[in-house]
Amino acid sequence: MSDEFIRTEVRIFSMDMENVLREHDGKGGWKKNTLQSLSRMMQKEVDELEAEIDVFRSLARKRVDVPEVRDAIRREAIDVANFAMMIYCNAAINPKAGKGE
Ligand SMILES: [Mg+2]
């Protein structure tokens, strides 16, 4: 894979991930979190994403489009992705991740 090519969707999505991570920079980080705790937090974000999708579907049935709901879906998708990224990274670089659980 070429280092120079990142498809547009991935580039935009990853930039949004970074923006959200920066909002939380003061919270102490995630690199010492266990895989299980990160997975639990990701599941909470999946639940939030599904709740927003339910709102969207309910409005769509009434043929109502609320841009704020679509924005909320995008934000929750970023939250899920950021926890998936943390799990991906901790599984690779932290040999103690997940121990003791
Ligand atoms: Mg969220």
Image: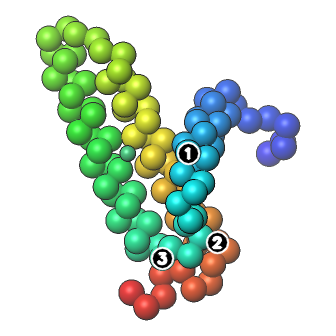
Q: Position of residue 48 (x, y in %)?
A: 29, 44
Q: Are marks 1 and 2 in contact (CB under 8 Å)?
A: no
Where ligand 1 lies, by image quadrant? top left
In the rendered structure, which disc, 1 or 2, sits on the residue that comes first in sequence?
1
The residue under label 2 is which amino acid type? Ala
Q: Which image quarter holds the C terminus?
A: bottom left
- Considering the numbered disc 1 on the image, is that residue within a helix, a strand or a loop? helix
Distance from mark 3 CB to nearest ligand 1 atom below 8 Å: no
Quadrant of res 3: top right
Q: Is residue 92 above or below residue 81?
A: below
Instruction: Name the front one of labels 1 and 2.
Output: 1
- Closer-to-camera residue (29/48): 29
Residue for point 35% across, 65% down:
40
Q: Are marks 3 and 2 in contact (CB under 8 Å)?
A: no
The residue under label 3 is which amino acid type? Thr
Q: Position of residue 18 (x, y in %)?
A: 63, 43
Q: Position of residue 36 (x, y in %)?
A: 41, 74
- The residue to which callout 1 is attached is 23
Residue at mark 3 to residue at mark 1: CA–CA distance: 22 Å
Q: Which image quarter holds the N terminus?
A: top right
- The residue to which callout 3 is attached is 34
Instruction: Name the front one of labels 3 and 2.
Output: 3
- Considering the numbered disc 2 on the image, is that residue within a helix, a strand or a loop? helix
Which dot marks residue 92? 2
Q: Is residue 45 left or right of residue 9?
A: left
- Considering the numbered disc 3 on the image, is that residue within a helix, a strand or a loop? loop
Q: Position of residue 78 (x, y in %)?
A: 48, 41
